[in-house]
Amino acid sequence: MSLGLRSGLLSLLLLALLLGIYHLATAPAGGPAASGASDEYAKLMGKSAGATKSDGMPTLAQMGEAAIKHLSAPFYDNGPNDKGIGIQIAHSLGRVGLGFFLAAVVAIPLGFLIGMSPLLHGALNPFIQVLKPISPLAWMPIALYTIKDSSASGIFVIFICSIWPMLINTAFGVASVRRDWLNVARTLEVGPVRRAFEVILPAAAPTILTGMRISMGIAWLVIVAAEMLVGGTGIGYFVWNEWNNLSITNVMFAILLIGVVGMLLDLVFARLQHLVTWRE
């Protein structure tokens, strides 16, 4: 049996164990009778049966019902506060994608320059070290005050949180290129532009992609918190709105969906890293 197959089986066993623990922890204390009473209570309160659970966290059955409900019609739009989960995810991914792209446009070329020039590294490093530790959400009031648009402010926050890992990893990767490769390029009188694209970039690509992978993970994490603050649309706003509606089932479902989307984004960059490493 291959290592991948064994790892997959172990993951399934761990998942079954976690689901079993969760089921035991959230099962109604009185069994089926208590569950029926809870559903009757929900009907009397004007809520759908199984939508909420008055005595604690949602059960696995309620989570399954919520998943089927949201995934069966993910792109409906009934107004500002009632949009499908697919639309909310799309808004979040759009903000993350644009902010991440702008950060890459700035960070990768600047990282190249810093990595190739000790003078620039020494001059810019103090600014990087001061700005890097600042929480991205600390920039939100400044963004809202200057940009005066909540969606654009969210994109700006993603830009701020994405730029530093890409910048630092690009500079490190470029500075770590083997000196003998550069010396050979100089001996062959290869021009600076050609040397950058044909020698430095392929050698530094795995490190650059590592920075991009880290940046994407941080960006997806930050957008949820940013959307909770600015409201409007997005998966973060969905979580906060469902919390205000006291729908813990929908909150739990959204949290799981955030994790799944984050895992898929990470897998994309992991695949790119694998391709770059394999080609080398």
Image (cartoon, rainbow, N blue to C red):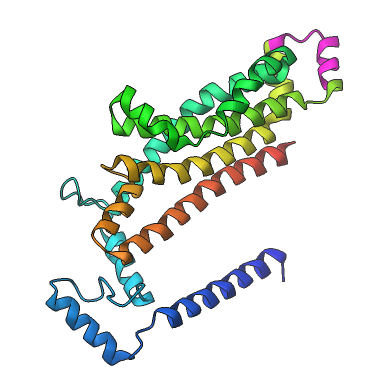
Q: Is residue 218 above or below residue 17?
A: above
Q: For residue 210, which quarter of the picture? A: top right
Q: In front here: 223 or 184?
A: 223
Q: Is residue 33 above or below residue 114?
A: below
- Provide the residue span drawn in magenta: 181-192
Residue 89 in the image: state x and y as whole percent. 35, 47
Q: Is residue 21 left or right of residue 273?
A: left
Q: Is residue 9 above or below residue 134?
A: below
Image quadrant containing the N terminus: bottom right
Residue 166 in the image: state x and y as whole percent. 59, 31
Image quadrant containing the C terminus: top right
Q: Residue at x 48, y 30 (%)?
A: 160
Q: Is residue 123 above or below residue 139?
A: above
Q: In front here: 97 or 54?
A: 54
Q: For residue 109, which quarter of the picture? A: top right
Q: For residue 49, which quarter of the picture? A: bottom left
- Determine the main secondary structure of the stretch shown in magenta: helix
Q: Residue at x 21, y 52 (%)?
A: 76
Residue 13 sits inside the magenta stretch: no
